[in-house]
Image (spheres, helix red, strand yellow):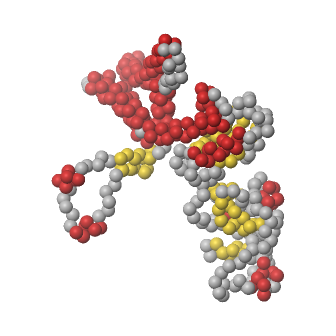
Amino acid sequence: MTNIMGIYTLPTVCLILYLMLMPLVSYLLKKWDANREMKILLDAKKGAGTKKNQEYKRVRDYWKEHIKYANRDNRHVAFKLIQLPPWLLAIIMPKPDEDEEQSAEAPKDTFELPQVQRRWITWGIFLAGAAAAFGAPLTTMTWQLLLTSLSLWVLYIIISLTSPKWFLGERAKANEKLIVCCTDDLKIPAEDARSHFVVNSWDEETNLEPTNVTFTLPKTFPPKGGPEKAVLERMNATLTNTRTYILDESDGPGLDTKDFKLKVRAKPPMPTIATFDPFYIFADGIEAGAFAIGFGDSGGAEITTPDGKTNVVMYVNMSGKAESYARKYGLTMVAPATPMVLIMGPTGSGKAQALTDKILRIQFWVVIDGVKTIVEGIPYDPDNPEAPQPEWTQRG
């Protein structure tokens, strides 16, 4: 046991020193920032306030933000390829034949690995450096491996600082716009604005648009409200081209002047195509007389399908009971009673059947993937009117 401990003592020390590099650099950056802030403060006093409002951006904050995000960045690996000049391409690449030239695809300007996440690369480099530091004393190439370990650590830092640079820069722009909402609309001092809002979630597709934001209101906020409308207007004008920001009333009032909170959420973006999903009429809370007719950004009901897609589905409330029925299931639906509909279609499509057939014709079934499904409470089957009502096949 003593012999084993003796063998692995030096490798363990090398590994600990390797792991201490991060907190050591963080501490040095903290001291650097403190000295810089003190110098700016002294210069401002000497300059009679000429630099009083100069804001110093802490290097340590930049370091921590980028390293933290790089360690959990689940975006896939992608980077731009170096564009060679045409004359160099002509030397390297042979000139294609006419047939090949017509069928040739345009060269790609990016290299992508869709199945490889960026955090796997950064963590792999960091752990490889740790392994090299631990194994260095156990081999005859001690100094070479220690140098390799240090090089891998430097490479890890470079990738962690550069990989999320554009992404975090775009998020910083969104945060700056939220700061303007605080300073201009909520009348919060500029130096306190950043601490008066929290972005609870970002858009799942791009991660660049805030989808849920909570503002802390100033004590001078008027009890009857008013400025929140300016906040929503500014957010809709500057933060998005695809969404609409509204008060988040999913868990209590969106504007709470008692607790000085303003909660804002973004509606799902309008899709470019409205694809029907049976879940829109079979979901819990959707009454049999509510017919899904399309998507919108207001009214209707927010429906999330089993595969996670959320859309604001617009409904025709034929029975007049759809809204009250939805409330029983905790679903908010805006669909005024619509006892009349307009039937359109080409000649011979059956528009007049609603007038000439028996009243039972208003009862219907749907065909999904070749399976006829009778809607709950509507047993009529024109092929077999006397047959009993079948089971509700889509209720699971």
Left or right: residue 259 compared with residue 2: right
Q: Can residue 186 be seen by looking at this rendering?
A: yes
Left or right: where 136 falls relative to 209:
left
Relative to residue 371, is residue 334 depicted above or below? above
Q: Nearer the viewer, residue 245 or 51?
A: 51
Find residue 384 and report its horizontal and vertical position in percent.
Answer: 75, 84
Tell me which corner region of the image, top left, top right, bottom left or bottom right, holds residue 159: top left
What residue is drawn where x is 51% and y is 24%? 55
Q: Is residue 85 left or right of residue 367?
A: left
Work out whether residue 198 can be spotted.
Answer: no
Quadrant in which the N terminus is drawn: top left
In this view, the residue in front, 155 or 320, is: 320
The residue positioned 69% from the left and 63% from the top of the image is 314
Where does the image place residue 235, in percent across and percent down from the top left? 62, 44
Front-most of 241 and 147? Answer: 241
Q: Is residue 9 above or below residue 219?
A: above
